[in-house]
Structure formats: structure tokens, C-alpha cells
Amino acid sequence: MSALLIRGGRLFDPASGVDAVGDLLIRGEHIAAVGEVEARGDEEVIDAAGLLVAPGLMDIHVHLREPGQEQKETVATGTRAAAAGGFAAVACEPNTSPPRDTAERVEELLEIARREAVVRVLPKCAITVGQRGEELSDLAALRAAGAAAASDDGFAVADAALMREAMAAAKRAGMPLTVHVDGPEMVERDIGLAAEIDWQVHFSHVSLADEVELIARARQRGLRVSGEATAHHLALCRADAPEGDASFKMNPPLRSARDRGVLRVGLSAGVISVIASDHAPHSAEEKAQPYEEAPPGAIGLETTVGVVWTDLVHGERASPETIVRAMTAGPAEVLAVEAPALRAGARADVTALDPECEWTVEPERFESKARNCPFAGRKLKGRATVTIVGGRVAMREGRIVELGAAA
Ligand code: DOR
């Protein structure tokens, strides 16, 4: 059995109450010991002095584009980007071509992931057939095939009666719903449905102050409602976008400085319990079109940790506890999966971060196929330096460890 000893890092898992300098021992696919470690001498050693050793980060809002849009990204390149950015697991949106709305397509994706992914891939499926908002997908069959959540990302289900049906079907299937936020009216409607049906709803890429306030009130009422913010909505506002630069065009768009301020407060208050990238790769040709025609979306897997660490932690707007929770236990709770944790017996998904590492964003060096990055040229402080997935090193100091290389 392979063994890894991560030595002398700051072990940091706020959800489990762990914060102490110590060692982490991994044997096979699991964590064998935390803190006081009895090494045998057969372990591969990673020196983690000065690093923050956290549970493996999860990003539950990622576009991998396969099948159908492989010119933008593939499972192979997208998961390499994830590993490079410190993510041990990603949940990917169903707006592929064709959309992932059948059990077969979920199985197909899982098969590609088994062959080619360097991090865990949790497939999301479409709430409605073809994401057209007309007819429900078979959520029970999709769940049985391995769908981690249902989402019509890119679109909100406009028909309220259909959304009520979707929520009831999701409850019967035990399927988490992560919905595309399209303004406060829709958030209010879906909170009402969650209360009526007594099911869970997670709001993707929340960006407006009014949306944050609605989610805060729903949580105070004890409803199972959660919110997510992207790194770009937390760090940037409308005034930061150069006129006509399509790298800053996303959906929802960048908002006012006040909205961004409320989003940051919501994050620290736990109303926004998830940070995601909404990694949305597009080809250079598509983004080079006139602004109005360029597709919305920004890549983010390789910048999210650096951006939130720079802007929120070093910027003293959020604590490291808040950030790590929102990238580990927070997303795991939304998907109702076992949270990554620094605990003996837990699955060995681990991310080490160097909070002091200063670097410049150079998209041409990214693992992602795409370059549509609004942070290009930015100097950041904070970076993931090791990503471990199920006991296997997937990334170390920026280099992807090829599949099979660790065997
Ligand atoms: O900016 C976005 N891009 N927002 C979405 O909701 C969809 C995404 C995409 O698929 O490119």
C-alpha cells in the first residue's frame, strides 16, 4: 500500500475543529493518522512547513464541456485545471451538447471520468429535458445513474408549476437542486416552493444584495436554502470591467460595489456557504467576437484559491476558516455527500495551500484549454501547491502528476 507523510503543516479543517501544526499520514486511499503520527519510514514525504493543509477542496459549479464542445474544454483538461487550482473534486454542469438529461449520458460522463479525470467528477444532470424548461427529466433514473444534483444551469425554470413538480420529483429521488439564479423574483419563488414541498434548494452564482437578503431570511426560518458566490463576483464589480472586454462578460454579470459588499458580508455570515468558480471555458475565437455576440463566462479553476486568498483573506474581508469551509464542508453539505475532512479513516482528499506564495496570473500557462480569464496579469498572494485525491498526488507545485504515474 502506498503511503504519504505530509509533514509539519498547519492542519486546518474548521468544520472538524482542527487547527494545529502537525503531520498527516495517508495509507492507501485513506487518512491513517492526524497530528501525532508514527512513521514507519516507507512513506513518501511532503514537507508542508509554512503550508496550510486543508481537506480536499470541492468546486460544485464547473463546466467541463464534454461531450460536444471539446474545443472549449474536456474532462481531461478541465480536471487537470481543477487539480492545478487545488480542487480534489468538481461537480460539472449539464449544459453540454447534448445536455446531460438521461441516465445514459450520466453513465457516459462517469465512464470518461474514470478513464481521464485526475480529480473526482460529480455529474450534474438537467432538471428539464434539453434544459428547455418544458418537460421534467426523469430525476429518479438520473439519480440512480449517479447524478449528484440537478440544475438547468444557464437557465432558470421559468414555469412555476413545472418548478413545483421538479422540486417534488427531486424530493422523491433524493436529488439536490442547484438552480441558476436569475434575479430576486425567482429566488423568492423557489424559496416559497422549498418551504411548500419541504425540500432543499441551492442558489448558484448569487450576485445581488437582494438575493443575499432573501436567502438570509429563508435560513433564519430554518428552510434548507443555501447560496453560492463565485470568486469573480466576490472580488470584482462592474467598475473593474474594461469597456468591451469579453473576458469580463459573464452571466450573471458583475454587479455594483454595494452588491459585492453584501455578498462578502453574506459569506462571512454563512448565508453564502459555498464559493465556486463557475469555470466557464470558451474558445479564443468565440470570445474575440464583438462583445454583444461573445458568449458569457469566465474560467476560474486555476485562479479561485489565489483570488479569494488575496482579496478576502489578505484583504481582511473574510477569515481563512470561512474560505476553507466554503470550499469543503459547505459544498459537501449542498450535495449531501461526505465532507472531506482531516480525520483518521476519512478519504484522503487533501489540499495544501501556500498562503504567502506570490504569483502572477498567466492564462497561457493554464492547464485549461481556455484563456477567457478576467484576472489575467493580476498579482495574487496565495496558491494551492499540492492536491491529493484518494491518497494519490494529482498536483504538486503546479505540476500535474499523470494518471498511472503514482501506481
Ligand atoms: O457566464 C456563464 N457561463 N453563466 C452561465 O450560467 C453559463 C456559463 C456557460 O456555460 O458558459
Image: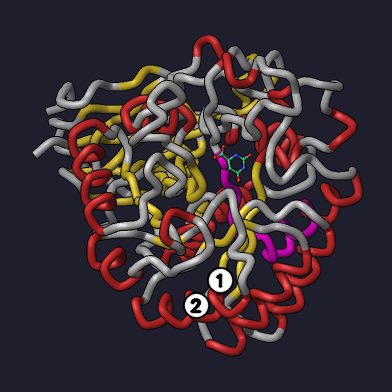
- Any magenta on residue 10? no
Q: Name the amino acid type tagged 2.
A: Met
Report helix, strand or loop for mark 2: helix
Q: Is residue 280 above or below residue 170?
A: above
Q: Quadrant of residue 75?
A: top left
Image location (x, y in percent) of residue 141: 26, 68
Residue 57, horizontal then vertical, whole percent:
46, 45
Q: Which residues are magenta?
A: 264-278
Is 147 placed above or below 140 here?
A: above
Q: Judging from the image, what secondary structure is the residue with disc 1 in?
A: strand
Which of discs 1 and 2 lies nearer the camera? The answer is 2
Q: Position of residue 215 (x, y in %)?
A: 72, 70
What residue is drawn where x is 36% and y is 56%?
101
**Which label belongs to residue 138?**
none
Q: Are marks 1 and 2 in contact (CB under 8 Å)?
A: yes
**Label 2 CA crowd tier, 10 Å (few <14, some 14–19, many 20+):** many
Q: Residues within 10 Å of mark 1 (few under 14, many from 20)?
A: many
- Quadrant in which residue 289 is drawn: top right
Is residue 111 in view from this perspective?
yes
In the rendered view, does 83 fall on the left or right side of 331? left
Residue marked by disc 2: 167
Residue 32, visible in the rendered structure: no
Assess whether residue 273 is covered by the magenta stretch: yes
Left or right: where 143 falls relative to 94: left
Q: Residue at x 53, y 87 (%)?
A: 198
Q: Which residue is mark 1?
A: 201
Residue lying at 91% horizontally and 49% vertically, measured from the top left: 258
Give the amino acid at mark 1: Val
Question: With 406 as the anchor, is 16 left or right in this view?
Answer: right
Q: Position of residue 274 (x, y in %)?
A: 59, 55
The chosen color scheme is: secondary structure
